[in-house]
Structure formats: structure tokens, C-alpha cells
Amino acid sequence: MEVVVSMNNSNPHVLATDQQPVLETKNLMKKFGGITATDQVNLKLLQGARHALIGPNGAGKTTLINLMTGVLDATSGQIFLEGQDISQLAPHLRVHKGLVRTFQINQLFNSMTPLETLSMVVSQQKGLGAKLWQPLGSQVEVVSRAEELLELFHLTEVHSQVTSQMPYGKRRLLEMAIALACEPRVLLLDEPVAGVPAGEREELLRTVSNLPKEVSVLLIEHDMDLVFDFAETITVLVNGAVLTEGTPSEIANDSRVKAVYLGHGEELQHG
Amino acid sequence: MLTILFDGIAYGMLLFILAVGLAVTMGLMNFINLAHGAFAMAGGYLTVALMQRFNVPFLLCLPLAFMVTGLLGAVLERTLYRRMYQKPHLDQVLFSIGLAFMSVSSIDFFMGSQQQIIQLPDWLRGRTELFDGALGMGHYRLFIILICAALTVGLQYVFDKTRFGSQLRASVDDSRVAAGLGINVNVIFALTFAAGSGLAGLGGALGAEVLGLDPTFPLKFMVYFLIVVAVGGTSSITGPLLAALLLGVADVAGKYYVPKLGAFIVYTLMLLILLWRPQGLFVRKGGK
Amino acid sequence: MKSSTADVQRELLKPSRWQIQEFIFWALVFAAPWFLPGHALIVNEVAIVALFALSLDLVLGYSGVVSLGHAAFLGFGAYTAALFAKHILPDPVVGLLVATLATTLLGGVFSITILRGTDLTRLMVTLGLALILLELANKLDWLTGGSDGLQGVLMGPVLGRFEFDLFGQVAATYSLVVLFVLFLIVRHWVYAPMGATIKAIRDNRLRAAAIGINVNAKISLVYTVAAGIAGTAGALMAQTTGFASLDVFALDRSADVMLMLVIGGVGWLYGGILGAVAFKLMHDVISSITPQYWTFWIGLFLVVLVLVGREKLLKPWKWWSA
């Protein structure tokens, strides 16, 4: 069993291997006019983490991801990736440094097939995105990696179907496959199983749990089964601020967390 | 020089009345309507026809131009434009260019291609000189300024102080949310489009004497309307007003002092402003 | 059954392979000026316009910029080529290269302006450039001939050997060769990984940035190349007609080409070329029936086309579906 370093600031823990967090936010704040969407968030994601971010709707979870990836500019505060300050870095450059995310609502390339999409992403990742001389498909490394990903995400049967015509579950798988094709070091998953029919969740969940250990994962989810199966650390976000952090059992027994969820009509149960 | 300023202001106010409908439509429906100039042209030609064939007095033609083109706008909105709101901007551009072409050709066919002359009533002709001739105010231009100023005040009042105005502003900010609040966005769209077209028609009638009127009017002046909207922004009334005044004065002054450069000044000015402020000069905080 | 990597590669490469109808098409096209000598001038005209349409497709279809002022680059290329031939060297190919390079530079500088703001901003900024160039060409009449146009551009023989003849056959072949070469380059580009990233930007800008594509840089690049190609078309125009005039900047030229693209299909390699041919046919047919009111029918066509749905034009069986 893995020993987890506690995120609780007042309780620096044993076996803290003086690890530099692979992703860290310091006093991150985002205001929209009078509304504070992100309120002094200090989050540390460790190497190899299986870290979940939960909270009621409107808590600001997606906003936090948007800030981390540079889609939104922070009002104040900083973001560090492997010790480097990336707060001012352009979104696409953050991807180059290994910070990759998926979207809550599928963001796919609808006119392309999964094969084309993944080949394109892989060749982009390998730095071939500016290549002009040879057609896409002539580079063996690119194509075989794309094939691997297709198989990993159970997309082989639909690999030549135009994305806009694929069933929803497959599209959700593609959503994640694209992120993996970027060879992430830090992966931010925004509600990966949202809207996926029960029959297809298994595939997705298995793939998430089989992600390589070198990849550090931050998962936003509402499905508590998934959260408690997956996470080694859980951060609870409420109204843009961190309420508490801890191991799954600490969180499950935290009365404040229960209040937040019960107050919103949700139950914090897990199998 | 004061005369130049005066003429420029008159021109600018006229441009504002002509373009304000376009600005609000753009902001409200996110629709690029390159046929807006056709409504202005319709107002102008209607006035000419009424005056020449039915001896309708000029002053009466103005509200008539407003109402008829407003009605035309309402009809077109319901039948044609409404289907285009969700389409990509390229489609909207193509669609409205098509409408503009059709209107230009039709007017050419029915009314001929020559310049139309409007016979102003006597009391609008003439000129008053002030400050020993430093300021020469043509009476017609003065009339234009007064009418447009009154309309502007009225528009600002409707926008700021009436219920319709606040519903309009809410719909401009976010039409989905507005609909969710129970605002009948379809009606707002229709009324706004009609009013905007009506104002264009009125502007066309008013401006025929000053700007000239022939079938190429929509295409010729469309650029100016677009400049007013692009520079002035689409989220307020004052933005396009100031942009129109700036444009009017710059154009008149430019053509007077540096005729060699002509419209070059206006285009360059616009380009520079848009480079500096891509959202337009006057953007309301919190708006789109 | 698991297919081999080679199979999968083949599948990816399939669209980039030349198809038999493409060979036939180009063979016919190149033969045209020689089998229809009376129509060589028209072939030349269509080839040039097709090239311009191809360049506009890069802007509209591939980088998604709604531009009404693409004729700015056409005109700039035309005047540069004309002036170069008149005052420096009447060699066509050298002039072509110079004009293309100059226009590409202009496009590169200008491409920064199209990145920010709304669609309306882009519309105005691109239109603004065309209008400014028009005014400049108009006012600098000591250089450009003003509203009379730049006349008397006498070209030397192409590659030192092929004199421009009266029938226009050399001109047509020259233009066709240039069109073909540029088409090949663009075609190659579209199927390369670079082209795939551009397609990605077109499909979903947000995701494209989220997978590490420098969206702004790519869009600028496409726009710059498109400007250069438009400049080439302009140069061809000036060189093959011996003349450059103000209406090369005109709004209706930009609108006509947009229409061609729309007819042929935006975002598709052959869209501009086929659209140019179709447009020319339509124009001649309609103009012979009603010469004066051509704009009305074009306008009506545009309105109906957009209302019905652009994709449905080439697929009549879709007319009766939703």
C-alpha cells in the first residue's frame, strides 16, 4: 500500500520525501468582476499522484483547470510546473512542458477520424507538426504509436469513422486518447466519465486506473465510486476555495465535507 | 475651421443615425448585416418618390420613411434574417451581400441609375453666418444636427431608462441568460431590427441631399457604417456616436485640408484604432 | 483481425494519393489553350482567377478568417509586377518571383492584425487594407497611373524563349503552369502533418491549443502564404494582360471570388478552381440573357444558397431533407 504524503499544511507528514510537487499553485486567485471564482488556492500535486478534486457544482473546479492550463489568466497568484513558474506561459507551451488536460464537454476534431486525429496529435507531439515534405502517414513511428493508442482506448473498430458520427462513449474515449497522445507528465482530467452510458464506463475507468505511474493525475469527478477507487489524495473545493484535503477515508469522515454535500442535496457515499 | 467642424458634426450625426441600427443588431444578434445600407437607400428613394409623385411635404416624408422601412425590416427579420442568426459569419456576410446586390439592382431597374435630387423646402435652404463668417451654418445641416441629436437623446433614454431598454441590454449581454430570465428575446430581436432599419431609412431620407442618392448607395456607404460599428463597439449607444462623430469630422476635415489623400485618412485611422483596440474604442466592461 | 502498421499507413495516405480524375482534369486543362485557340484568353483569365480563389480558400476555408479585402494582395502583386516589368526588368518569371515575394512580405506583416478582435474587426481590418491600397494606387498617380491604370507593360519572353502571342496561348499555358505548381505545393501542404494541424485549428481551435499547437503562429503563416499566392495571381494578371488598373482592388472582385469559392466549396482543394470555372460559365450564360442585371441574379443566388445551406449545392439529393 502506498503511503501518501498529507496535503494538510498544519501537519507535515512522515516519509515526506522532500519531493518537489510536480504541479503547484500558490495563492491562485481569479475574479470575474465582483465574483471570486478561485480563492487563494494552494494545491500541490506530487509525482505519480492519483489526486482527485471534488466539490459541489459551481465550486470552481473547471476554472482551476483553466487557470492551470492558461486558458484563463489568473488575477493573482502563481503556478509552478516541476518547479518552473509557468504563470505567464502561453497555453500551447504548457502542453510542450507536459501539462495536458481533457475537457468536460468533448472537444474533438469532428471532421477527422480517430486515426487521423491521433496521428496528427502524435506527430505534433513528436515535433513533426511543422513538417511539410511527407504526407501524414508516412512516418512509421507516428502511425504505430497512434495504433497503440487506438487499441489502448478500444477505438480500433471505429478508427476510420468520422468523429462526429461516433457514439458518445467512443468519443469520450477519444477525448482521453488525445490527451494521452500528448505524452503528458501531468494529466488533468475534467469529469472523464460524465455522460458516458453505464456499459461503457468500465472501459474508461479501467483505462484511467491503468495510466502509467510516471504520469501524475488530477481528476475532477462527481462520481464518488470512481473517486474513492482511484484517488490516493482528495482535495475538496467549495466556492472557489480549498475546504480541506486528505486521504479518502479522512475525507469520507470529515463532517464539514458531509455538510457541504448534504447541504447541496448530494450524498457522500462510496461502495 | 469652425464651419468644417460644424459640417463634420452634421455628417457624423447623420452617420450615427444611419449606423446605430447596425451596431445594435450586431451586438444583439451577433449578425453581420452588410445589407443595412439598403434600408437607408430605401428610405431615401421612398422620400423621393413620395415627394415627386405624390407631392408629400418633406417633413412628413421623414416619419413615413422611418415607419415604412421599419416595417420592411420587421418583415425581413421574421422571414429571412431569423434563420441566419445561428449560421457562421461567413454565411451571414454572403447572405447580406446577396441582399445588398439584389436591392441595388432592383432600384437600378425601377428608378434608374441617376442621382436623385431632393427638393428641400425653402425654409431649410439658406445659411447663417456667425462670428464674421468664421462659422457658416447651412440651415439644412443645422436641421440634421437637431433632429439627430433629438433622436440620440431619445435612444439613450430608451436604452437607459425604459424596461425595453434594460431587456435589450440584457439580451445584448447574453441572450440565452436573458431568455432564461423570461425576456422574450424573439420580440426584442424583431423590434430592435425594425427600429434599426427604420432609423436607417430615416437617415437615408435625411441624408439624400447631403450624401447623394443613387443605386450604389448601399455599397458605397456600407464601409462607413461598418467603421462606425467596428470602432464604436456594439455594446453601447455612445460608442458608435463618438465613433461616428470622429469619422464625420475626420472625413470632412481630411477632404478639405488634404484633398490629395481623400478617404485614405479615414481608412488609416480606422486601421490604427482597430490595431490598438481590436474590440473597438468604447467597450463596456462586462459586455461581450 | 489486426491489420499491420503498413495497412494503417496506407489508409492514412490514401487521401493524398492522386486519383485518376485529377490526372484527367489537369490533362484537359493544359490541353485547352491549344485545342481551343479562340478561347485561350478566357482560359488564361479563369486560371488566374482560380489561383486567386485558391489563395482565398486558404484564408476563408483553412484559417477561418472572414476577409473582404483579399483583393489587396491581388492588386499589390499586380502593380508590383507591372512596375517591375516597366522600370527594371521585363522578364516574366523574375517579375513573378519578385511580386510574389513582395506580397508575401506584406501579408506577413499584415497577418499580425488578423489575430485579435472579433470577426467584425477582422472583416474591417482586411477591408481597410484593400481600401487603403486602393486609395494609394489612386493618389500616387505619377507611379501607378491613377485611375487610368498602369499601361504599356511590355513583357519579355517567358524563360527567354516563349514570346507572348496574340492568341494568348503562351499566356494561358504560363498561367496554367504557375497555377499547377502552386496547386501542387498547397496540396502537398494540406496532406502533410502541418496541414493536419491546420485542419485541427479549423475544427476546434480550443483543443488545438490544448494539444500544443501554436494557433496564432499557424494562422499567421497560412494567411501570409495566402497573401503571397494572391500576389502571384495579380502578377500573372498584370503580365498576361499588359495592364494594371484600380479595379483589381475593387470590392466586387473580392465578392466574386468569394462566390466562386462558395460554389466550388470552401475548405477543399479544388473548390476555388472548380468554382472559378463554374462561375465563369454562369456569368457568361446569365450575362448573355440579362447583361445589366447580373448583380441581381448573383445576389439572389447567394441568398438562396445560404438559406438552403452551402453544402447542399453540390448534393441535390439533400434538397429534400431537413
Image (cartoon, rainbow, N blue to C red):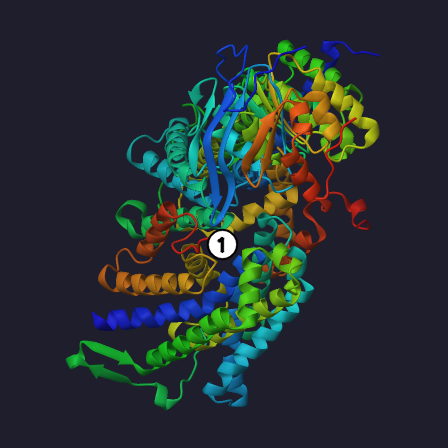
Question: In the depicted view, which residue is nearer to us: C65 or B108?
Answer: C65
Neighbours of disc 1 within 10 Å: few (<14), some (14-19), many (20+): some
Q: Which residue is mark 1?
A: B287
Side of B217 relative to C91 (left or right): right
Q: Residue at x 50, y 68 (%)?
A: B215
Three-letter residue code for mark 1: Gly
Q: Which residue of the protein is positioned furthest toward the left in this rendering?
A: B132
Q: Is residue A98 above or below residue B143?
A: above
In this rendering, would C297 be left or right of C151? right
Quadrant of the rendered structure where residue C80 is?
top left
Please give the chain letter of the residue carrying mark 1.
Answer: B
Residue for point 38% across, 54% down: B281
> Within the image, what quadrant is residue C26 found in?
top right
Residue A2 percent across, percent down from the top left: 65, 11
Q: Is residue C144 visible?
A: yes
- Location of residue A7 with respect to C69 vertically, above or below: above
- Res B53 quadrant in image: bottom right
Element class at badge 1: loop
User: Does residue C198 appear anywhere in the picture?
Assistant: no
Left or right: residue A107 compared with residue B42: right
Residue C189 in picture, x, y percent from top left = 56, 24
